[in-house]
Image (cartoon, rainbow, N blue to C red):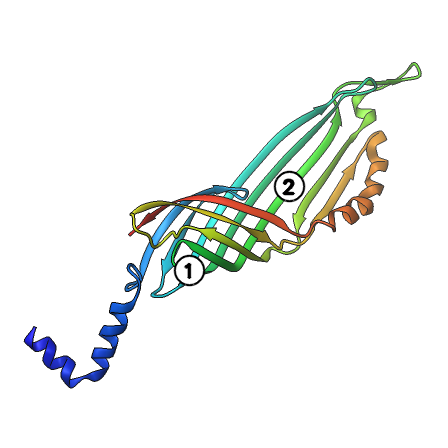
Amino acid sequence: MIIRRILLAKRPWATTVAFLLASLPPGSAAAQTGFALRAGSLGAGVEVAHQFRGPLAIRAGGSYFPLNREITFENETIDLDVSVEARFASAQLFADFMPFGHWFRLTGGLMYNGVNARASLEALEDYTIKSRTFTKAQVGTLAVDLSHDRTIAPYAGVGIGNVASGSRRIGLTLDAGILFSGPVQVRNVRGTGMIEPMTEATATVQEALNEIRIYPVISIGLAIRS
């Protein structure tokens, strides 16, 4: 104690630093690190966060969401099978600003938007019209690939809870925001048989997709703090 008083007396800057540290809110006097398991509209993933002294933190992580689905459309004329196979892979680097303490966050950053999807359509049975029957092969198939031109996209959002800092070692976090992904691009359209003329509608489909330029992002996380 005596040595500490002597040092503080000889170094006025040490007194200032000690005062500033003592005046910081609880939990902000030292940097903290944590990680989280997440699930949401981008799939399931993991995240690592580092809380600096003060209202700033950075986060990095990734998510993955596979989708395989088959849908059957039935009507009086013909039954069609639509198959969708997609892989949603993302990685993000975010900065958090917490103006009101560590419970509320304003978030901005960049995200790798790796979306690759393939959809196909084919008849489930032969097609009969006006007493004339067409086989499944004659009806044909249609296939299309979908992806984003903008693989790196900006993100803005808000959040509740802090991955790296909190009063408990384990906690929950919630994030909601918008990914400015740009429109999905229609690529490599293939058609056979009677369905082949539908490939000429590619420009019309792309025009409709060009209107969708953002993707809503919401996720909940289980944070484990060091």
Residue drawn at 62 percent across, 55 percent down: 180
| The one of 136 and 164 positioned closer to us in this rendering | 164
Residue drawn at 53 percent across, 40 percent down: 65
The kind of residue on which mark 2 rests is Ala
Q: Which mark is residue 100?
A: 1
* Residue 100 in picture, x, y percent from top left: 42, 60
Q: Earlier in the sequence, mark 2 or mark 1?
A: 1
Q: Nearer the viewer, mark 2 or mark 1?
A: 1
The residue pinned by badge 2 equals 117
User: Does residue 175 appear to the left or right of 13 in the view shown?
Assistant: right
Residue drawn at 49 percent across, 49 percent down: 175
The kind of residue on which mark 1 rests is Phe
* Residue 86 in picture, x, y percent from top left: 61, 39
Q: Residues within 10 Å of mark 1 (few under 14, many from 20)?
A: few
Task: Name the image quarter holding the N terminus.
Answer: bottom left
- Tell which residue pokes out farthest to the top in this image: 131
* Residue 139 in picture, x, y percent from top left: 82, 26
Say which element carries label 1. loop
Image position of 2 with respect to 66: above or below:
below
Residue drawn at 78 percent across, 44 percent down: 205
Q: Residues within 10 Å of mark 2 (few under 14, many from 20)?
A: some
